[in-house]
Amino acid sequence: MTEAVRLPEAVLVANRGEIAVRIIRTLRRMGVRAVAVYSDPDADAPHVRLADLAVRLGPAPPAASYLDVDRVVAAAQSTGADAVHPGYGFLSENPELPRACTAAGVVFVGPPADAIETMGDKARARRVMRDAGVPVVPGTASGDLDDAALLAAADDIGLPVMVKPVAGGGGKGMAVVDDRERLAEALQAARRQAASAFGDDRILLERFVARPRHIEVQVLADDHGSVVHLGERECSLQRRHQKIVEEAPSPLLDAATRAAIGASAVAAARACGYRGAGTVEYIVSAAQPDTFYFLEMNTRLQVEHPVTELISGLDLVEWQIRIAAGAPLSFSQDQVAMCGHAVEARVYAEDPSRNFLPTGGTVLAYAEPAGHGVRVDSGVRAGTAVPRVYDPLLAKVIAHGPDRTAALRRLDAALGRFAVLGMQTNTGFLRRLLDHASVRSGDIDTGLVGRVLDELTPDTVPDHVLAAAALAHLAALEREPVRSTFDLPGGWRLGDPAWTPLRLVGGRRDATVHIQGSSVAASVLIDGGAPLAARATRDAAVVHAQLDGVTRTYHCAEDGDLMWIAHRGDVWTLRQQERLAAGGDADSRGGPVIAPMPGAVTAVHVRNGDTVTTGQPLVVLEAMKMEHQLLAPADGVVRDLAVGPGDQVEMEHKLLTVETPAAD
């Protein structure tokens, strides 16, 4: 790329997390100064540290920081940034940002405001695409129909139908309805969610395509009349209508369909006067892979853009900046060459076993893979706070190989070496999903994750993890200063070493683990079973544990009475109940009452010192717009009450302890 264009001197990245880090890295490579913005919880975030300059926008709520157009533009002006890159999410598809940038004399790295506005209104977008000859899913043409008109339209479209908001994205407010009796209720629910999320309660109906595949096409358009596509991405592996695994190219399409859908995407971009990088999304029936329908156009960079970069060899962020600076595309459609196969997995702070409930907290330890064909786009490191007010995406792990089988194998291995401790993540779930027979064969659709979810969420903690936790805990005790021989783990005694007992609770497992010896030569008993020979070598937060001759690697971290153990992608949270005296009864003492999910404390029914009985209400926690009563696990006395009404708590936060009398 040797065209003479004046690149911006400095680009303000109006975003956070992994996408801000990813954009800043390209800016550095291009020799362009990077300006970061941040809210109060992100003051020490990786994107802030990586940038040349950073500006505080405001407090945590997005409306007072990342979603405030005036503050973003003012930050650009105050730092001398002559361009603004919105990333994705937040203001990236708000036409008011490019208009405000233009008024302030700042370049917007993205499409014109009119194109954003046209494609952001799904009803209007459908009309524009239909007029351009782009096939659209049969459905309502207007977003201004009331519920009665939508019910009548459903009879013409035919069930099942997809209910979807006119504005917004990310699956919010969308629902599939196959029973007309439920449709009126679904319309009202979708309107409420759309009004809350987007400030617009207009609704569309579309025919629901059986066994749908979600396929999208990456386009690039310059200001000189050139529009090209960079092939398609398969995005059918989704949860709650949101993508979690994407790949390029799609294993579904043949060469003829690939050429047709690419040409359709180019026509779509031309029809709305597009400029920059964008994505045209289609729905394809698994039963009729040569038939595709326009869904929508995302007028921004996509989360999954790395898979296209890896197979095309192009840096899409660089091209966004060059196009915004007025550069023409330096290649034609015939010169676009695709090489190999790439797959991306999104790592979220969420718990798949609890219907992907967002988690959050502070990253206690972090490890990411590297190597040939592996890329990680991450927005966290050890010490990073992951607030619940933002999207829970932590990182993306991407693998490239000569073919799909090689790419999947590399991605699986990379996810096995990836670890985030301090919160529950979906990493282990992603590994099991990628290993599912349907995924390996490419026989996927947007409903697959929902159908196989129970198969992919283990419900207990394996014995080898409990043993590794005991070894890690023992190694930590051994590193502490020893004041006397009586401070040694297990105490001191003549003859054989004493057994140190631990009660570890987590993942539907309540186990008593006894460990004897030292971490380099130990015996472990789990719930009175046969002894395991164990030894560990410890390097910072990594334990290489040998259990009965099998060596495994674990990432470990402790936070008070919580232990986090990661192995091959899975993360287990184990709470250490009150440590027992040697030979003690693991059930002789009560334990803590913990928050099963992040939320707000709305009521506390007890005080320190209160006597409670089994099943008595203690605390009310509100999460996901529902109230959850936490009950006394046993008869006892309330101790260590740590919360009050109005407090926000993270998942696994200890609220109080119910202490029961020790057995005689």
Image (spheres, rainbow, N blue to C red):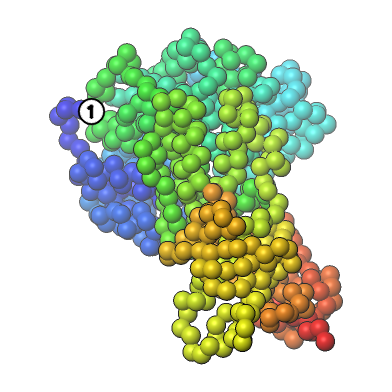
Q: Nearer the viewer, residue 287 or 294?
A: 287
Left or right of 392 on screen, residue 302: left
Does residue 203 sit above or below 503 in this rendering?
above
Q: Is residue 341 above or below residue 103?
A: above
| Residue plotted at (37% across, 21% down) | 338
- Residue in view at x 59 percent, y 30 percent: 439
For badge 1, the amino acid type reads Ala
Outermost residue toward the left in this view: 4
Q: Give the side of residue 646 with respect to residue 77, left or right.
A: right
Find residue 601 and report its horizontal and vertical position in percent. Answer: 67, 68
Within the image, what quadrant is residue 25 found in? Answer: top left
Name the foreground residue: 14 vs 99.
Answer: 14
- Looking at the picture, how far across and down is residue 535, in whole percent? 53, 64
Q: Residue at 77% of width from left, 32% of height from top?
A: 183
Instruction: Indicate the secondary structure of the residue bearing disc 1.
Output: loop
Asked if 198 appears above or below 157 in the picture, the reply is below
Residue placed at 83% from the left, 31% from the top?
Answer: 181
Furthest toward the bottom, the residue is 484
Other-residue count near label 1 (Cα within 10 Å), few / some / many at <14 / 14–19 / ≥20: many
Q: Residue furthest top?
A: 256
Question: In the image, 259: left or right of 8?
Answer: right
Q: Is residue 140 visible?
A: no
> In terms of depth relative to the viewer, which is nearer, 34 or 98?
34
Q: Where is residue 328 shown, x and y percent of the image?
A: 24, 24
- Locate the N terminus by quadrant: top left
Residue 149, placed above or below residue 373? above
Tally of marks: 1
Q: Is residue 465 left or right of residue 29?
A: right
Q: Which residue is mark 1?
A: 327
- Can you tell which quarter of the image residue 588 is in? bottom right
Residue 102 pos. (x, y %): 30, 39
Looking at the rendered image, the quarter that the C terminus falls into is: bottom right
